[in-house]
Amino acid sequence: MRIGPFVISAIITVAFIFALNTPLPVGGSKTPCLGAFLSPQHGFWQNAEPVDEDYNGSLQLPGLEGKVDVYFDERLVPHVYAEKENDAYFVQGYLHAKFRLWQMEFQTHAAAGRLSEILGPGSGRTNFLKRDQFFRRLGMVYGAEQSLKKLEADPITKNATDAYTAGVNAYISALKPNQVPFEYKLLNYQPEKWTNLKSQLFLKYMAFDLAGYENDFEMTNAKSIFSADDIEKLYPTTEDSLDPIIPRGTSFQPASIVAHKPTSADSIYFHSNDTIETPLIVKPDKNNGSNNWVVAGSKTRSGAPILCNDPHLGLNLPSLWYEMQISTPEFNVYGVSFPGAPSVIIGFNDSCAWGVTNASRDVKDYYEITFRDSTMHEYMYNGNWTKATIRNEVIKIKGRPDVTERLAMTVFGPVIFDKHYQNILKDGKYYAVRWKAHDQSNELLTFIKLNRAKNYWDYIRAITTYQTPGQNFVFATKSGDIAIRQQGQFPAKWRRQGDFVMPGIDSSYLWQGLIPSKENPTVLNPARGFLSSANQLATDETYPYYLAGLPEIYRAININKNLSRMSDVTIEDMQRLQTDNYNVFAEMARPLLMKYIDETKLSSDELEYLKKFKDWNLRSDINEQGPTVFTLWWDHLSKAVYKDEFDRTTSPLKQPDESTLLEGLIKDSTYKFLDNINTPGIETINEIILTAFKAAAKDAKAADVEGRLAWGKFKDTGVRHLLKLESLSRLHLPIGGGANIINATSGTNGPSWRMIVQLTNKTEAYGVYPGGQNGNPGSKYYDQFVDTWTKGQYYPLLFLTSGEASSSSNIKWKMTFSKA
């Protein structure tokens, strides 16, 4: 009789052990192995840090050449003092790993097309396999491998990256099971050793994020239903209201490279009836941009330049940035770094400061390839069958067999779309991508040189090495110089080259050269006493090269308007400007809308919402209702104007920019696209604006009933964990701003780092980012800065000497690193 209970007990025990050590299906996904995840000794409980966590320590590690002291201030910002430069990068790698290891590896997995390896294939909006396939076929790994060759050929960057990688791996090697970051336990995988290639993958991912937005296929489809004249109206290459980075009236030298348009372009390229079903193309947020500006000492109260920067990127936890100071015998620098790469990216040193914004230039084009047959071994090029090389990309999938992506490599680049790719084009054609990020480059060298720059010519020598993604580097020195250059290796294009998919049968549509760095738009010490960039075009049309890209205009107009009228400028003035919520786009649009709205045709409810718009102070603050009404009205107006024409095709098309519609209506009240081509009559601007408002008022009423009419609630900004887990995110933040506003905070995108630096004899600097120094959700330093950022407040940045750090009341912990 005893054997029965024993057997039952044994079966229950085995089942329990199996359950604790097997991922179980729940709601379409799987749990982690619950035994390990819930283990008191090693499970997720161990990731909860005490409020009074002690970060003091003394470490002896192989790979170091000398001593490094690290002082952490009360915000957990490390101040690193190294006797040897490469030791500083070693410790930077160690600290990045200690506080951001999972983030570092997850981001490089995303860049390398390896998310399926840890998350499974996914489905729907979270189809990780499709995303992995896209990044493999885009050539992200190929581009990183190419750039790694150039990085490792330069002793400066090779030594820095080798030291950084050694520091990351020193931390990983000593990692105990209970110290493994929470997300690894949740997803049931382990950290890998870091490599120099991983750092390059991260930098290529940033190249994609900042210069990966394009509409070549959508623009090509537009040619099938619109005339060349219509294309110019819908997608102009510049706007009348543009206030460029380089002030109008600046003279430029003639172009040293003249791009010649192929003789077939007018018949083949600009006129085509082909339509293309756009396949899965992963696109970064088109709002990824930034503001930067610098005010000369002639306009400041202190007499010293003030430099400001706030890059607008995705709002994530852990944050993209890691704040730190690095001091060596060669340089002393403070700012924000990328977890995953050495050096400081945006910041200041003892002599100067710099910041960056996205240049928004098009450096990624598509070419239609003609293969001899489906093997893709040979393609037609310049009248001959040319051999393609084949690159096999193996994608490992959690719980499933591997998938191999077979890429044909051509003179243009990898064939991203072919007959074997899941998301094939309906026409069965082949398309290769030519992307500047595929070329060998060494962007790290730029930042290593900027970290130690002392003057304008050091700045020029540093950024001249920079290739992609194109950036606007603003700069200032304590000696009083201010400057800006739009820097990158940009192809010299003929007008509209690369706006549409191009023929790939010969070399005539290839890029014909790269613009020399010295011919990139540059200004030093302008008479007006300030410089700025906010992702607008760098120049007016007198610049001798075609500025292909996706420019914005309204933030720049507002920034320059404010800076022009300012004098006796202080840091507080710059803080107010950097967090300003004034909507200059609405200022320009409201007179047009009010001119043509017929109030006699509105109901009492509709008049109520019109009054909210009329009485609005044009500030997109959190409690204002006017910006919600305006946003709804403009969205409906855009649909009312363009939808009938765009509905002539089921293929995707690029929507015209807001500035295009506004300027079109201001210049011409009979704007061609106002009339609805599906009705017998001819609609007027009054009718279209009235129709759009009535639809907007209906939406506004619904939002009002739901308690979402206030702009902050309607916009609903959140800082989301990289896995989109709500419990690890900061959602529904009370912050204003938005598109076309200096404080460019949308629901998911915004100022990822605000920095203001006054270059007085004793540098005075302030900054904040929406996150925290520790990537561990169980730490109080995980999201410590979010509320400060939301309120538009700043922290003083402690730029300390080693002696000051050792005795500062702001320092809470010290770690010492020395050679083993």
Image (tube, rainbow, N blue to C red):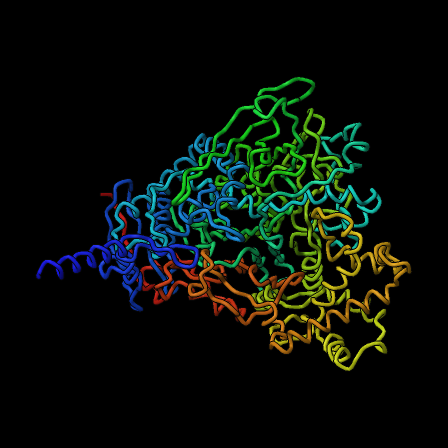
How many numbered circles does the render carry? 0
- Dividing the picture into quadrants, the one containing residue 610 is bottom right
Q: Is residue 40 visible from the viewing direction of this image?
A: yes
Taking 60 as reference, is 99 above or below it? below
Q: Residue at x 57, y 38 (%)?
A: 467
Q: Is residue 626 left or right of residue 387?
A: right
Residue extending farthest to the top is 384
Q: What percent of the width, then of the height, locates residue 354?
A: 55, 51
Q: What percent of the width, then of the height, locates residue 309?
A: 57, 56
Q: Residue at x 56, y 48 (%)?
A: 209
Q: Considering the image in quadrants, where does the C terminus appear?
A: top left
Residue nearer the viewer, 173 or 714: 714
Q: Is residue 472 left or right of residue 528?
A: left
Taking 143 as reference, is 305 above or below it? below
Residue nearer the viewer, 525 or 207: 207
Residue extending farthest to the right is 681
Q: What percent of the width, then of the height, locates residue 269?
A: 76, 34
Q: Is residue 757 visible from the viewing direction of this image?
A: no
- Dividing the picture into quadrants, the one containing residue 785 is bottom left
Q: Considering the image in quadrants, where does the N terminus appear?
A: bottom left
Residue extending farthest to the bottom is 604
Q: Residue at x 34, y 67 (%)?
A: 809
Q: Residue at x 73, y 38 (%)?
A: 545
Residue extending farthest to the left is 2
Q: Is residue 670 left or right of residue 468?
A: right
Taking 807 as reference, is 267 above or below it? above
